[in-house]
Image (cartoon, rainbow, N blue to C red):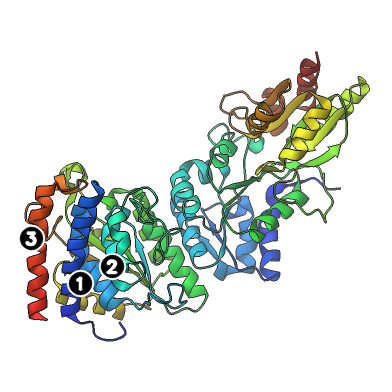
Amino acid sequence: MGNKATRAAFGETLNELVADGYDVVAVEADLSKSTTTSTFQDAHPDRFFNAGIAEANMIDVAAGLAVTGKVAFTGSFAVFATGRAYDQVRNTVCYSDLNVKLAPTHSGITVGPDGGSHQMVEDLALMRVLPGMRVLVPADYNSAKSALRLAAAIPGPFYVRLGRASVPEVYAPDFEMELGRAYVLREGSDVTLFACGVMVVEALQAAELLAAESVSAEVIDIASVKPLDAETIIASARKTGRVVTCEEHSIIGGMGSAVAELLGETCPVPMRRVGVRDVFGTSGDPDELMAHFGLTASDIVVSARNVLA
Amino acid sequence: MAQTPDVGVIRSMAARMRLDIVEMIAEAGSGHPGGSLSAADIVAALYFGVMKHDAARPDWAERDRFVLSKGHAAPVLYSALAESGYIGREHLMTLRKLGSILQGHPDCKKVPGVEVSTGSLGQGLSIANGMALGLKLDGNPARVFCLLGDGELQEGQVWEAAMFAAHHGVDNLIAIVDHNGLQIDGSCTEVMCLGDVEAKFSAFGWKVISADGHDAEALVSAFKAAEGALGQGVPVVIVCGTTKGKGVSFMEGNAGWHGKAPSVDERERAVAELTAVIEKEAARG
């Protein structure tokens, strides 16, 4: 069980997709070594296009490639691919319903020392609100590979959120992610911890800590933030009656908001959201930042106690 | 070009398209007549002379592709698509109305023959680059034509795309600039001076051709020159000098007609002027 970053899956999986017969191309914006699309470039130089430091052009070149039938992946960092090129993602990719797969890396605060300008904690909000966009947040390297394969297999716009930091393995190498499905990783009866991305491991640790306090926590991976697995989420909320969402994202507009919207209409239960609390990131080591922003297992435990009180 | 385009056909189609544009926008009560009229001869040359396409087979793999980067000129495209047979003429008078396939800006999910939705300016050339590269990867001989407005050149993304096309040797792409000199807030020179458009593209590594965008003969020879320059590792642009509102005397050269529908009286005057041109072209033909 090796610790690997979700970004490490990107270039490798694109190579596998071509081997499997997918007509895959990739457009990058000068970050191929960081995103690992350089792995794809090395294997398939004719299918790789560097746009230079020009994210708007990157997205629309991918859109054009998709118009001609390609499965077009884009690289860059989450902050630039979604923020800087938002109009391109909205008005061209989504409005035309094109087969473009945004899989930017360096999402969230675990980017680390680069600081707040590069730590994207609003991307899920930006992507989730777009009609036709599907949003996946893999928890580990194996689920990232599966998320990328899933995005390639289903026509239309996808956002696959990848990260820079290494994360422990959660899923087996043969894991096959399904669109709109949440994964119950641990069953419990007192409180549900809904998590995504790097927070899945934290939520699993939190459940262990809570067990020591005789609190039975259910842990569910919301790998598919859009569409949500309403059935699984509602069933768990009904069962436990208490909910904590855990995400490496702003508490505004992300997975926690999506779950709140769903449960607010279907099964309102007491709820807490663990996430970045409406502030920008800051420089520091990823572990320090997880503690600084209150995203660790012990922070989840505090929120769980709070919602149970 | 499959065969030498018939200049007479281009002229008469452009005249008919201008009448469609005015009537569609008048009927809709809103829209963009100025930039649609300025592009009518260019679009007529493309659809009725230069581009290889077949309305009976909108998905024909080897069709030339057209991207209307200046999406607000949708009426000129819709008219060309109707005259070509992609859509029935009965749709034209539904422009901009609830339930119409003819949205205010082109929607590829609704209209056969529209390759990609446009409307947010500055994006078409990037999309055209991607399409051209995709066609090349497939060994497809089709070409991509992308029509830009001149005000649109103020978008930085156009120059990202210009740099990209030259760097990646996108040589199955012909960009066309409808250089009418006006934008919503006034003349381009006053609002945000474009400088020397030809020199800018040239500096970005493009082959640049200039043409009178209202002279069918000049357009045909410009496209012939552009096609002759394809396949040589360099993207090609035709900068067309045009007049905003061309063909309707009171709209010509007036920025106020960028995005305004004619009144009943103005429609009548415009229709009379444009009908006279159609009749003249018919007599000539």
Mark nearest the camera among 2 and 3 is: 3
Q: Position of residue B81 (x, y in %)?
A: 32, 67
Q: Amino acid at mark 1?
A: Met
- Quarter occupied by residue B278: bottom left
Chain ID of residue with mark 2: B
B263 left or right of A211 in image: left
Q: Which residue is mark 2?
A: B80
Q: CA distance from mark 2 to mark 3?
A: 21 Å
Chain ID of residue with mark 3: B
Asked if labels 1 and 3 touch by Cβ distance under 8 angstroms, the answer is no
> Earlier along the polypeptide chain: callout 2 or callout 1?
1
Taking depth in this image into account, of B230 and A259 the one nearest to the observer is: A259
* Residue A90, placed above or below residue B229: above
Q: Which residue is mark 1?
A: B13
User: Is residue B274 shown to the viewer in this render?
Assistant: yes
- Quarter occupied by residue B196: bottom left
Q: Position of residue A63 (x, y in %)?
A: 48, 58
Quarter holding the C terminus of chain A is top right
Q: Which mark is residue A103?
A: none
Disc 2 is placed on an element classified as helix
